[in-house]
Image (cartoon, grey):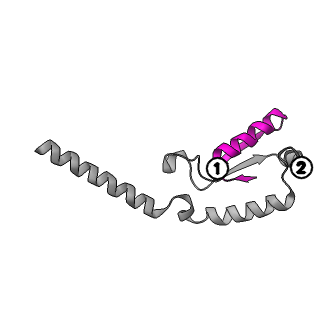
Amino acid sequence: MVYDNEPTARMAEQRLNLEGIPCLVKSLGGGPGLWGTSYNLLHDLLVYERDLIRAREILKISLDDLGEKESVSQYECATPDHVINRRAITFMILVMVIFLVFILVTSIG
């Protein structure tokens, strides 16, 4: 079951844990070691196959909704642009360079 962000996936995980269903939340398309944070990336909630029907009932997820969401998310995770916007990376690098130049100029002068 794929969720749009980590907090939503963690809420579903807690709900299933309260019902005694073991589960695992996994970040898709990166993680904390890749971009520094993963809370806003897609997250997959994994359950054992034997618990899948009960988990869907508890989380009120229909089979059609689940299949549609998983097929879309697998396609989106295949592209690196979904993980982080290239313009955002360029902007962050530019800001860091300007900041370093400013520090260098003020320390020399």
Residue 79 vs 36, above or below: the answer is below
Q: Residues within 10 Å of mark 2 (few under 14, many from 20)?
A: some
Q: Amino acid at mark 2?
A: Ile
Give the magenta part as a residue range. 1-27
At 89% from the left and 49% from the top, the residue drawn is 53
Q: Which mark is residue 27?
A: none
Q: Earlier in the sequence, mark 2 or mark 1?
A: 1
At 66% from the left and 66% from the top, the residue drawn is 75
Marks 2 and 1, Cα distance to the nearest angstrom? 23 Å
Tell me the SS state at disc 2. helix
Relative to 77, 104 lies left or right? left
Q: Nearer the viewer, residue 101 or 31?
A: 101
Q: Residue 13: x percent and y percent?
A: 74, 40
Q: Which mark is residue 53?
A: 2
Relative to 40, 92 lies left or right? left
Q: Which mark is residue 5?
A: 1
Does the residue at mark 2 contact the one at mark 1 (Cβ under 8 Å)? no
Relative to 103, 58 lies left or right? right
In the rendered image, which quarter is residue 21 located in? top right
- Is residue 90 shown in magenta? no
